[in-house]
Image (cartoon, coloured by chain):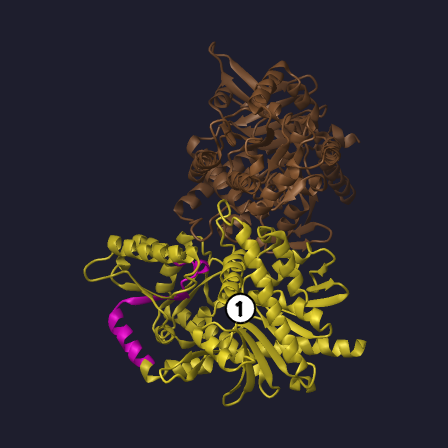
Chain colours: A brown, B yellow
Amino acid sequence: MSSRTAPVLVASNRGPVTFRVDDAGQLVSSRGQGGLVTALTGAMQGAGGVWVAAAMSDGDREMVARHPEGRIQVKSDDTSYELHYLDIPQDVFDGYYNNISNGLLWFAHHYLWDTVHSPVFKEDTARAWDDYVQVNREFARTLAEEGARQHEQPTYLVQDYHLSLVPRMLRELQPDALIAHFSHTAIAGPTYLRIIPDRIRDAVLRGLLGADVLGFHSEAWAENFLMSCRYVSGARVDLGRSRVVLEGREILVRVHPISIDVAPMRELAASLQARRLRQQLNRWRGNARLILRVDRLELSKNILRGFLAYETFLRRNPTWKGRVKFLALLSPSRQEIPEYRIYSEDCVREAERINAELGSDEWTPIEVRIREDYLGAISAYGLYDVLMVNPVFDGMNLVAMEGPVLNRRHGVLMLSRNAGAYFRLGRYALGVNPFDVESQAAAIAEALEMPEDERTRRARGLSRLVRANPPSRWIRLQLDDIDRVRRRRGTAA
Amino acid sequence: MSSRTAPVLVASNRGPVTFRVDDAGQLVSSRGQGGLVTALTGAMQGAGGVWVAAAMSDGDREMVARHPEGRIQVKSDDTSYELHYLDIPQDVFDGYYNNISNGLLWFAHHYLWDTVHSPVFKEDTARAWDDYVQVNREFARTLAEEGARQHEQPTYLVQDYHLSLVPRMLRELQPDALIAHFSHTAIAGPTYLRIIPDRIRDAVLRGLLGADVLGFHSEAWAENFLMSCRYVSGARVDLGRSRVVLEGREILVRVHPISIDVAPMRELAASLQARRLRQQLNRWRGNARLILRVDRLELSKNILRGFLAYETFLRRNPTWKGRVKFLALLSPSRQEIPEYRIYSEDCVREAERINAELGSDEWTPIEVRIREDYLGAISAYGLYDVLMVNPVFDGMNLVAMEGPVLNRRHGVLMLSRNAGAYFRLGRYALGVNPFDVESQAAAIAEALEMPEDERTRRARGLSRLVRANPPSRWIRLQLDDIDRVRRRRGTAA
């Protein structure tokens, strides 16, 4: 396994550490949460490495200003790596991030458009696309420079749809580079992808095909990608062996579902603060059963239909009135994009309508809390009887994993069949069609009335599946893929 | 070719003949226009046959009332066949036709939903689905009965998305039946198809797979269907050979793009009435160049973005103001469905806005005519300089064929790359992304400024391609497919 000593260079839009300037004018850093950061920093462990990301906060930009090369050393207990933040002008970042990444590619891959009316591509899309190209080029150039500083050939791990052009751009700078790209989103099929302007679609697909290995969270997304590649001129697609050949290079398409990092989450859930929050929540809940959802306030999360399903459930099962509460913990998201602002208002209004129509002085059917509150979510996971995860489409969905490993009531997971997580957890969840309010209402009833032994069996199954696939495994499988490419290339050379 | 004497039984929602009761109380019939009717009645020529359809008009229902078996003999110059109309109760028809066929399946296959908000499936969908099943069963039963009356084994030709369950239902009644089904619409890919309720999706796919041969207008739609079948339990899909095996039966998936029947259309265009309409139009047009669109007022036709593209073109090329006119001939469609009523209003309002902002006392940029006016369209085809056909998604699109064979000015066809017709006519058209208003505006400019020799080359190419594929060829290829199945089955027996 000598290859594991090869340096690892990670690129992602958002970095693992956020900086802010404190009152004394000092830069203070805080590490991002979640399994992805753990997995990717873990990959750099021992091997050394560099993480290239965009400066997102004012503090991040201040860090770059104080370190003219934009690079600082990060050390924690078991890892040491360099952080290289790119300070991108605000207007360029806006085109790259808000307009193309989140306003176009995200919408495409999650089928979010109201196609009869939107999108309408105009000049501003072409301008924003130039920004996207420019930022991707900046990432590729930085990776190539950082790669050239390493003592041996590095492995490049490029993350997600913000950086879909990077593999090809990096390949042009370093033809022999070992490049993996991972898509954390859903991936649209070839017909829907025809919505986006032709040169953007072609550039994105060819950009990704610059990598040696492309990773996805589920077979469905990998398959959609492969089918789209059949329309890339010069590409040969082997659907059965999950490969594409382009310009004499072979690109592997692999499915590696990510999971979560259980230990630190359980530690946090056991903290004094979390216990206090749980006590508060328990008092609030009283004798009622608890339906919980935890989501970004994101168009794809299907919050509206979740409320409608709950309403339908209450109307069909009036004896449950007063005996159940729905808690929606929503964190604000992408408020720069008009559709998101409107959607947030729609969600609140719908909850208020349902509360007004079905609630009473003693009982409020739905409680909506909109704020950034990770600890609140971690605490609430312990208490749910039903966890509602019903996205329209979702690359994976980590809430469906976090809940079951922290829940203490053998709560039932209601899970959209269109989430990547369903392909892994489906057999222990109550699968639902997220567009079918009637069947979601029936699933709520089924979950609340499920016999204890059945709940237990499912809850244990979910927790076991999640724990069996730690993020370290997710990253190891990706590095194994790259090792195979490295060996094959070594043999061929 | 002895098999060609086998009787042909056609089933389609709308029949080839419409009845009305005249002032004297007599039933008067009129034959539907279009290549499909010609092709399918042609298939029955010589062989004899039956066409089963739903009674759509009050006159159709009166015909059924006067012929207790719902069956009458139709004779024209070269054909003789029986017409069997089914009188379906209005409320059942409403569920089958408006709710499921046009409100659900049509929306799914053309990617028309605003997924964040719609669809929301509730009880009424389940009820309407029962209606759809009931009507499909009625069709299957009628076909089986009519088939049993034939002197030898008939060929069943089942048409379109209204009757997707018929192949399987008919197969259950007659296990050895020779069944072809043809889909005239676009077909959604497997991910988008996950929007519709699971049992509906599964029933539709399995329903179609009851046939021996399934026909589509383009490779893209056939491919989407095949990919969806990979999720049908028990089905084995061979994408390369375009086949599915289910329950020991092999189902062929074939691409047969339909074309139009040129001769009668040219005859009509040469009629005195058409000539008069053309003169009127020519006076109205004056010295201006003419951009024409002819469409049903249908969500998938992309009328709004067409107006926006024209507006963008005028703003970018102000010297064209006063020198060009846009004529939109729109026939009312599906006004029972709320989205269609709203869309009609939106289209008119948008045209009025553009006229108010860019027009003058002497010049109105856009003229919108909403009415059923086939002859008007046939006449207008002669006169366009640019024919705009920019559907969001479209199974085939016959306007893109009718225009070029009737146009007399070497007009340019601007054609959506998402229309089935593009796969056949693309190389002589100006291909556009229908969501990209900027590039459509550029295409209008390119079309209007195209040199005469280039216009001529393209116009001739289009006309030649259309004439080379008459509807008789479309039907012959389908009957050839069925003959192959018949022979193979004969050998196997």
Is residue B161 a member of the stretch shown in magenta?
A: no
Residue A106 % position (x, y) = 53, 42
Quadrant of residue A160 in the image? top right
Question: What element does badge 1 sit on?
Answer: helix
Is residue B297 a member of the stretch shown in magenta?
A: yes
Amino acid type at image mark 1: Arg
In front here: B44 or A408?
A: A408
In the image as oriented, which residue stretches furthest toward the top? A24
Residue A285 % position (x, y) = 57, 25
Which residue occupies 43% across, 45% down?
A125
Quadrant of residue B387 in the image? bottom left
Which span of residues is magenta-colored? B274-303
Would you say residue B449 is visible in this rendering? Answer: no
Would you say residue A241 is visible in this rendering? Answer: yes
- Check the image and report above or below for B210 versus A127: below
Q: Which residue is mark 1?
A: B424
Which residue occupies 41% across, 58% down?
B340
Q: Quadrant of the N terminus of chain B?
A: bottom right
Task: Answer with left or right where residue B311 lies relative to residue A28.
Answer: left
